[in-house]
Image (tube, helix red, strand yellow):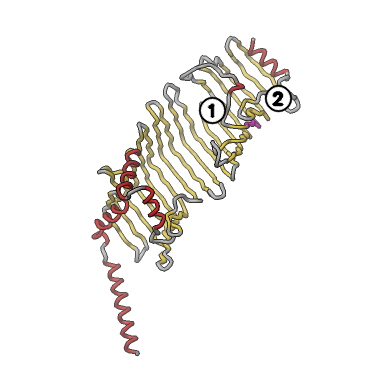
Amino acid sequence: MKRCFVTGALIVALLGFSLLLFMRFFDINAHRDFISRQIEQLSGYQVNFESIDSHLWFESTVSLSGLSLTLDNHQVLYIDQVKVSLTKLNLWDRELALGPVQLTGMRIKGDFTALIKAADANTEENSATVQQTTAIQSEQKLAWRQLTVSRLSVNDLNIGLTHAGQRVVVEGADFRSDNLLIIDDWQLVKSPSSGNLKLLVRELSARRSVGEILRVKNLQLSGSFNLKNLQANLNLKAGSLNLALAGQEEIAVQDTELVASLDNNKARITKLNSTIFSGELQLQADALFSIKPLSSPFLSLEQLTVQRLAIKDMNIVIPTMANETGVADKNKLTFPINNLTLKALIVENVNIRSNNSKIPLAIKNLNSSVSDFVLLQNKQLAGLVEEHKEAGSFVLRFEYLRWMESTIEQFEISGKLSKNDLGILLIKQLLAG
């Protein structure tokens, strides 16, 4: 019995030592062509990589260099290096937990429509029908019961995609997301129910057509979301934003900062600061949404309350419209917002001029404040109230105003936002004369 026990122990030790030697001297690069063919057979895409560096025994990491994805002999994806860390491997329960997964030097380029068509063609080629493929996938279980990633980070991301003459370019972006659930209950998770992300973009540009271009530089975005509870938080900063429209002057926005949140059907803009038209814009607002899954539209904005809107030191130009058909009757105008209330509006040192022949307006050094004014009710302009006690208040002051044939200089007035207020009646009389 003792001899059998010693013999068994020696066999186990020999097998263990052989396994150690195999893991130590096994060269996975010698089998990279086989691995590429297996991935290509499963995905339908041509996958290649230059080398694999495995340190599973000492550091629990695997690195891939020069990973590329090719469609119809056109490279659409290239990654300089992929580094994966392994934190948990439970073969009994089929659970796999990855630590940080880092992708460095990712480049994506090509025609978006061609990519979609190629993917659809591959799907049709490998299955008789889409319904059959879906049924097989729903019945087929993956090799792992659960797969998680503690952190996914992408450094130096560059994207260049085109579609029907439109183009989107992203240069020098960094992306990060924590605590990702990739596989759950033997199935691939189609969309995460909660998560967080952080995105840094050196430059982003989008071209809709000739002469219509959006450029954003030094974009910083971070946020979190929980779809089950309909909760989200967003923090955004942008160094500059330039919007060019065909036939219009370019709009330049600098130093934008936005802090917003969503809680069920309530959204809040805690902070919005921006420099636009050479001046400063500040906004705080609350919004109440109505969600009706069986209606169209399923999402509507029931109430928008602007807590504070400050406009300072701006030079505003009203542009010429491509199709000037006159001003419509205000009673026939409808808006996508059911109700809009302005709690506080502050205007300081604003100059306005119009290039639109339908709006012959010019104002110099406008200073004004408005409080508790209902702008929209039931998607229509509310107008002034009848009762003086229920009305909000206003202050208006400017150096010069020209409206049509009327010119007013050095003007100052204050009052209530009601139809019978003397200040309102005086303004109407001056503009009409």
Q: Residues within 10 Å of mark 1 (few under 14, many from 20)?
A: some
* Residue marked by disc 1: 279
Residue at point 43% right, 36% down?
217
Disc 1 secondary structure class: strand
The amino acid marked with disc number 1 is Gly
Q: CA distance from mark 2 to mark 1?
A: 32 Å
Left or right? Give the position of 320 relative to 39: right
> Is 312 contained in the magenta span?
no
The amino acid marked with disc number 2 is Val
Left or right? Give the position of 250 relative to 423: left
Q: Is residue 194 above or below residue 212?
A: below
Residue at point 34% right, 59% down?
62
* Residue marked by disc 2: 385
Give residue 51's position: percent from left, percent from top. 27, 55
Residue 183, image quadrant: bottom left
Q: Is residue 373 above or below residue 122?
A: above
Instruction: Write the start and end of the magenta stretch as one range.
Output: 339-345
Left or right? Give the position of 217 relative to 229: left
Give residue 132's position: percent from left, percent from top. 37, 51
Left or right? Give the position of 276 relative to 175: right
Q: Residues within 10 Å of mark 2 (few under 14, many from 20)?
A: some
